[in-house]
Image (cartoon, rainbow, N blue to C red):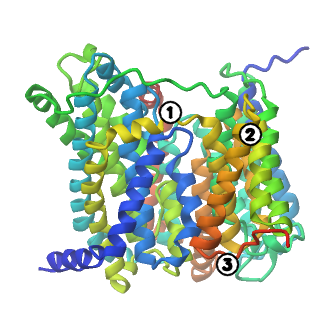
Amino acid sequence: MKIIIRNSKDLYAGILFIFFGVFSVAIGRNYPMGTASRMGPGYFPFILGSILALLGFIVSARALWVGSDRIKPWVFRPLILVLLAVLAFAILLQRLGLVLATIALVVISCLSGWEFRLLEVAILSLVLAALAVGIFAYGLGMPLNIWPF
Amino acid sequence: MDLFNNLILGFSVCLTPVNLLYCFLGVALGTLIGVLPGIGPTATIGMLLPITFKLSPVTALIMLAGIYYGAQYGGSTTSILINLPGEASSVVTCLDGYAMARKGRAGPALAIAALGSFFAGCVATLIITMFAPPLAEFALKFGSAEYFSMMVLGLIAAVVLAHGSLLKAIAMVFLGLLLGLVGTDVNSGIRRFDFGISDLSDGIGFVAVAMGLFGYAEIIANLELKGKRAVITTDVHGLMPTRADLKASWKAVLRGTGLGAMLGILPGGGAVVSSFASYTLEKRVAADPSRFGKGAIEGVAGPESANNAAAQTSFIPLLTLGLPSNAVMALMLGAMTIHGIAPGPQVMNERPELFWSLITSMWIGNVMLVVLNLPLIGIWVRLLTVPYRLLFPAILLFCCIGVYSLNNSPFDVVLTAVFGLLGYIFIKVDCEPAPLLLGFILGPMMEEHLRRAMLLSRGDPTVFFTRPISLAMLVVSAFLLLLIIAPTIRRKREEAFQE
């Protein structure tokens, strides 16, 4: 028998909830439960996780019958590049300083757009690096490395 | 008179040059992000939070509040001129505002939106002044059971008023509550869900959650659209509405203000819901509903007044109960905590200067906004010509630096990326992130009050039903849930959100 998924949005949402629910119950088992009058650190997470998993089950089960809301195709390019830009900034900031981290963030994130004009990106990254140094390092006096040395 | 003295106190604090300056900065920034689609008040406030560290708490809150209600003004500008809502709360303004602009009446539409907002802002300020003190007085009597039930009510109301599937919204609340529990348990000292990562021992920073879910996810989703941007075709000339315009819209402004002020106070309410509700109401009471969508000025006046009124009255539950009613208020709560203020009924007595100056600053901010928005409209419109491909790296950069500087921790920046991914998945599967953020903020508080209430009652769960205030709140929660499940109302709700 072939199961036709009519509502893939809800199906995936439900699976996501089940995952988080089961996950937190599984991990939460390691914490003492306590009693109703003296709740341990495991009590509230257990209740929340079980309800979440149950809700997830209902959401995904309903998706097999009700509605017809198909998930839109994933576009990976902006997703990956934007997140990569953020991660690069996180890794580079303390090692290479604000200026280079900013340039890395701007260049990588600009690759995720649909137009990449080299000159424009170069100017943008320099302007933003100057702004970031001016506003945050000097203006607000935040403890940020500016250069790698 | 007490009220009078309080207002004097408020004005005396917020009329100092520093506070005036930051109030102005706040509303100007709010207008800016209101005009720019793709960045909302939630992400902006999160982004600017670290910058407010150096300010006094009063100044910081005045500025952050200005961003929120300023965004309500700015959002309407783009809705009217290019049919592109800058803010979710001005989506409905597109319908009749843009229709008016196409008929060459952009000027009066903008003017009525600004004037309606101004009127609503003034009334809402008065309402806060009158209702906040008695409510705080009342809330001082609350015990843990009451607080727990109130949070249940708040979360349920948030779910009921959110759009989209009710079940998914409830699940998002639970997921948020769970995420809020990450970190060291205050009672036992046990570190929960930290996966051995020491950076997680203090829990997940709410700014990282908010910025990832609202900021990054939105940027990624916008980039998918290949950056199509409408071009402004309408000239703005003749700002002044005619006498007929005023006559047609003053009642709509009044109704919008009333409705918005009411919905703003409710937990889960706020600017977005009230603008939709007001549009529906205007259409219903109109003698000729068919005019709507074709440039009816009431369709601009009502929702624009409503969203501004709601943006301001949504401060009431935060300031009196310490309960955030929407995502932006959740951030304001975080801002207060960072500045060492525990939000709740005691704020009004312990920090009267903070409370009253925040409220009076809203009135002053509204005056500034009218000036900013009407004569200077041309400047804001020109900003729209900045292409998104130049804008989003800047937004991304400021978000990163903002999150980093909260704790000087690169790990927090990594966390925003994780939540950005999660937020993008939520967009794909149609789950509203706002209930999650609300649950996230309330999670630790709820657990604490649940534990305390159960400890005091020696493990007897009926304590939530035997204390009258607590019972009343649970009954209202149940009633709200029943309402939404009842088929007729459900249909109406879907209707309202579809318009």
Q: Earlier in the sequence, mark 3 or mark 2?
A: 3
Q: Secondary structure at mark 1?
A: loop
Name the side, left or right, on which B397 lies relative to B229. right
Q: Position of residue A28 (x, y in %)?
A: 83, 65
Which residue is the site of mark 2?
Answer: A110
Name the disc covering residue B385, or none.
1
Q: Position of residue B448 (x, y in %)?
A: 62, 75
- Quadrant in which the N terminus of chain B appears: bottom left
Number of numbered callouts drawn: 3
Name the disc covering residue B324, or none.
none
Asked whether B441 or B84 is in front, the reply is B84
In the depicted structure, whether residue B4 falls above or below residue B400:
below
> What's the distance in space between the residues labelled 1 and 2, CA to CA?
18 Å
Question: Disc 2: which chain?
Answer: A
Q: Position of residue A3 (x, y in %)?
A: 85, 18
Q: Secondary structure at mark 2?
A: helix
Asked whether B170 or A40 is in front, the reply is B170
Which residue is the site of mark 3?
Answer: A37
The amino acid on which the numbered mark 2 sits, given as a three-letter code, is: Cys
Query: Residue extending furthest bottom?
Result: B350
Label 2 crowd (10 A; few <14 / some 14-19 / many >=20): many
> What's the distance in space between the residues labelled 1 and 3, CA to CA?
61 Å
> What's the distance in space between the residues labelled 3 and 2, CA to CA?
55 Å
Mark 3 on the same chain as mark 2: yes
